[in-house]
Image (tube, rainbow, N blue to C red):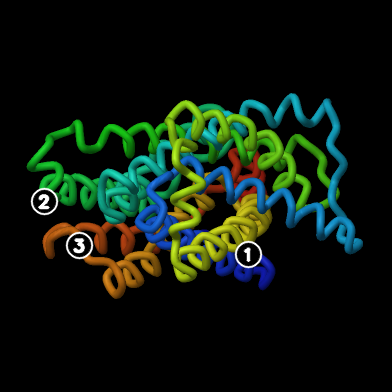
Amino acid sequence: MGKISTSSTYLAIAGYSVCSSTLLLANKVAIAVLPHPSTISFIQIVMTIFAVFVLKRAGISVDQLEWSKIKVYIIYVSAFVAAIYANMQALSQSNVETVIVFRSCCPIAVSLIEYLFMGRAWPSVRSSVSLLLVAVGAVAYCLSDSEFELNGFKAFSWVSLYFALITFEMTYGKKLTSTVKMHSVWGPVLYTNVLAVFPMFMFAYFSGEFEGLREHLLELPLSGLLVIVFSCVVATLIGYTGWYCRGLVSAATYTLVGVVKKFITLLLNVMVWDKHASSVGLSAVCLCLLAGTFYQEAPLIADAKTHDTEDKS
């Protein structure tokens, strides 16, 4: 996946992949035991903030909240919160494979934005073919998915919104890692979650999810509570591994890592969940994700020109 050579980058990608794949499945299970998607996200955000402050008290380096940094993170957090909400709604109304396939189309849009606005070269022929095959697989999935046949494009409204928000979040998030100086990876984790806690609370409130919530929580079995606690732990870990990985690779590569890692999610989903795509749909998903493994990170245009100049000399 691009020219990744350092062990720290490999470890960052592996950690982010495991956490993100696990969280997608954990959220699906959590929604099944507590059908309040915004409330679950709110609980995860609050627990992440609590965990970061505990780490700070324990001596771990965590950046202080500063207004100059808060201002630039507000835009990112707005997309971050909206993407979480759209993702949870998509998971509650469709299957995990649907979310995976729409997510797999994001690298194409991110590559285009990087090429037009972020000074990065267009991917090589090999990488372009890789992205094209991802798109072909996505179309094949949509044509075979049962919800698509039943409800048409209406069934994909939330995942379509999720696609647009993730594309913006990935590119703007990469810009933040290069323009906003942070002394610790826990800094971006703290900023995003502190700024996201109130909007997510409002999402849950206006969705009417707090009505009868106390009774729902009291009726939850121990296994249900453990699932929610587990999702909170993974949500905290994905915050750290995600920002760490994002700082080491391009926006397109980071986005594509988020696609390829869904292999793990897909395998876990097949083993423990009873709502799947058809065999044709699953084959299309595999095409999307396998094609993504052939992608190579495009260099910055300035670096590419320097490399060409050195080769000619």
Q: CA distance from mark 3 to mark 2?
A: 9 Å
Does residue 76 appear to the left or right of 207 in the view shown?
A: right
Give the mark, 3 or 2, whose residue is nearer the N terminus: 2
Number of residue marks = 3
The reply to whether the C-beta atoms of the residues labelled 1 and 3 are less than 8 Å apart is: no
Residue at screen point 11% across, 45% down: 143
Residue at screen point 49% across, 53% down: 217
Image: 208 above or below 2: above
Q: Which residue is mark 2?
A: 144
Closer-to-camera residue (312/169):
169
Percent of width and height locating residue 211: 45, 36
- Tell me the amino acid under the disc marked 1: Ala
Closer-to-camera residue (29/190):
29
**Residue 213 disc label:** none
Q: Secondary structure at mark 1?
A: helix
- Tell me the amino acid under the disc marked 2: Ser
Closer-to-camera residue (256/54):
54
Q: Which residue is mark 1?
A: 12
Q: Quadrant of residue 5?
A: bottom right
Q: CA distance from mark 1 to mark 3?
A: 28 Å
Q: Secondary structure at mark 3?
A: helix
